[in-house]
Image (cartoon, helix red, strand yellow):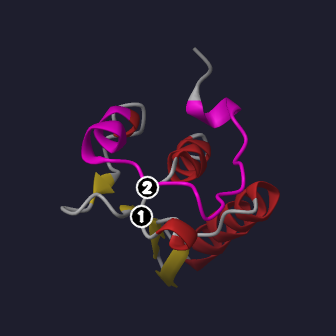
Amino acid sequence: MKHLSDKKCVPCDGGTKPLDGAEAAALHQALDGAWALSADNKSLKRSYKFKDFYRTMSFMGALAHIANTEDHHPDVNLGYNYCHVLFTTHAIGGLSENDFICAAKLDRLT
């Protein structure tokens, strides 16, 4: 089976349904344990801590590159030494495999 980080995101159209709880839980197991599923299974989040601003911004640059390459963009909140990342597929109102693919690609950075 292909690892999530080796996959590419695919566009979600109006007919794409969000992942159900069991599907999201199964994909969640392939990620670093620091990723958390929301109680309603509509989002996936992780917080990162860094030594300083430079490292935070370096990570943000890499995250931006992944997001643009995959054309799948997270919500991000960052400051001097932290970055909070939240994935959800807004177009379908919940999680898609794309969210897990991007999370797995971020796992490769840390």
Q: Residue furthest top?
A: 1
Q: Which residues are magenta?
A: 4-26
Q: Amino acid at mark 1?
A: Gly
For residue 30, the mark is none
Q: Which residue is mark 2?
A: 18
- 21 within the magenta span: yes
Mark 1 and mark 2 in contact? Answer it, CB < 8 Å: yes
| Residue 95 screen position, x and y as percent | 44, 57
Residue displayed at 73% across by 56% down:
66
- State the image quarter where residue 62 is shown: bottom right
Q: Is residue 8 above or below residue 68?
A: above
Residue 18, image x, y percentages: 43, 55
**Which residue carries the number 1 mark?**
94
Q: Nearer the viewer, residue 84 or 100?
A: 100
In the image, residue 83 above or below residue 38 = below
Dot 1 alpha-carbon crowd within 10 angstroms: few under 14, some 14 to 19, many 20 or more: some
